[in-house]
Amino acid sequence: MFSKVLVANRGEIALRVIRACQELGVKTVAVYSEADASAPHVREADEAVLVGPAPSSQSYLLGHTLIDVAKRMGAEAIHPGYGFLSERAWFARAVREAGLVFIGPPAEAIEAMGSKTAARQLAIAAGVPVVPGNAEGVRDADEAIAIAEAYGFPVLLKAAAGGGGKGMRIVRHRDDLADALASARRESLNAFGDDAVYVEKYIEGPRHVEIQVLADSHGNVVHLGERECSVQRRHQKMIEEAPSVAVSPELRARMGATAVAAARAAGYVNAGTCEFLLDRDGQYYFLEMNTRIQVEHPVTELVMGLDLVQWQIRIAAGEVLPFAQREFTPRGWAMECRITSEDPANGFLPSTGRIDYLHLPSGPGVRWDGGIEAGSEVGLHYDPMLAKLIVHAPTRPLAIARMRRALHELTIDGVETSRGFHLRVMDDPEFQSGDISIQWLEQRLASLTAPSTDRDTLRLAAIAAALVAHEERTAGRVSSGTAVAGADATAVTAPLAGWAAVARREGLRS
């Protein structure tokens, strides 16, 4: 086992890795930008090093600087988390060439799976089913039209080096394809430095289902079942769960075997995720492999009883996986909501500011993976995800009920968040029945983000706001000593505390 690991990330995933290291008896080195000088991950690590100004291009993306810091601080390995440098083959190779260990897959596996077109070619060669389409970037609009007409409209244009919906366009008519291709290429070039775009058949109404795999350096590969990731907005996941209501044990075994085959074909080592589209007839198609730990890994951890980040570290240290595939059967149901600093009622625009008050949910089966605290400054330099709220329960209905309860307990004051949006999803009958697809959220978005006009809600809000105002005035008199003191002060203010909490939770002001 390593004695010291550098954590090349920030926020909740940096804290997640630091905690995993602490339990393994491994010391940690955090890196931070000037904007993150007082961030929790800096305080929780054994050591911390400033690496640059706030922009990630001048701090967290400076791979060679991070390697130099690791060597200077005596770290033997680097954990990249997700995002930033986690899927950069050049960084994994540079870490290795510096005599350090990259806690992730080999650079060659990242290269093999890093390009969607290369991954498709590899999957086809390994007999893995893929969405019908071409396996490499198209040269021009005429070639794209010919491919689209061969498979039939609608088609999907996808950036070969893409992710997160960048460089992706749905095209339903021949006359729209040339403009869509030009637009996708521009966006792909800006986002990834590569304008290669390919064409595949657009599958109507599928689910997004992914399979978690673990592979060691001794030739052992296992899968840990599926995650349902269909609740998406603009191809960005918002809610994930494990298992999936659409996956039977037999289908799980088939999809899992396919994921293992893809991992073996890529020479994969460490934790990774194979993403699939699952249609309404139970046919599944390989999309890509994410060569890192996923944001949504906690739901798999909770149903499988396994610490994936610790196993990332153990595998990188050379340990052998002690598991047999038959040992992995999901137990109960886990669900995760991504808590972001966005305003759902205003088109999910980013919200910035200072977190003035933070109250975290607790109780049975509730987990909070966060990178914030009261006093944290939320800016525009980084991803808007503040934290992940995860629950585990015996059944899916109970998991939804538990998530609803946890969301009600959660209070984040100072910035707009997605908390209220997630509450509405939990109350949605279609979501509760599991009748969802990757298009479901876009179709329901207007109703899930519309301002509330419920008369009782407005009445409660007015009462709560008035009571907050009264509490603040009373507190002012108590502090000045002119009206109420001691036990009498408690008697006056205590009955108002519950109403104040409601007001804070709903973001109300007098």
Image (cartoon, rainbow, N blue to C red):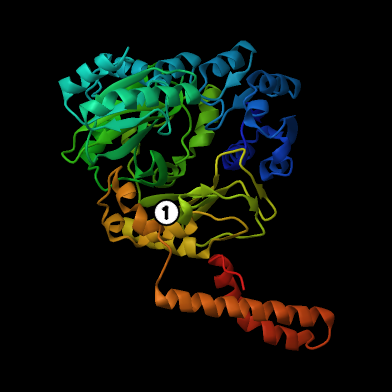
Image coordinates of residue 332 in percent, x first then y, are 35, 52
Image coordinates of residue 446 in percent, x first then y, are 36, 55
- Tell me the quarter of the image containing the N terminus: top right
Q: Image point 42% across, 54% down: which residue?
A: 392
Q: Image point 69% across, 35% down: which residue?
A: 54
Query: Would you say 3 lies left or right of 420 here?
Result: right
Judging by the rendered image, the residue that carries numbered circle 1 is: 392
Q: Secondary structure at mark 1?
A: strand
Taking depth in this image into account, of 228 and 215 the one nearest to the observer is 228
When asked about the image quadrant of residue 60, the answer is: top right
Q: Image point 44% across, 43% down: which residue?
A: 301
Query: Would you say 126 lies left or right of 99 here?
Result: left
Type of residue at label 1?
His
Residue 1, can we see it? no
Within 10 Å of disc 1 (Cα), the crowding (few <14, some 14-19, many 20+) is many
Q: Is residue 140 above or below residue 188?
A: above
- Tell me the quarter of the image containing the C terminus: bottom right
Query: Would you say 12 lies left or right of 70 here?
Result: left
Image coordinates of residue 247 in percent, x first then y, are 25, 42
Q: Is residue 389 above or below residue 90?
A: below
Total count of labels: 1
Residue 121, can we see it? yes
Image coordinates of residue 349 in percent, x first then y, are 51, 48
Q: Is residue 449 above or below residue 250?
A: below
Q: Image point 34% across, 18% down: which residue?
A: 117
Q: Is residue 79 above or below residue 397?
A: above
When asked about the image quadrant of residue 279, the answer is: top left
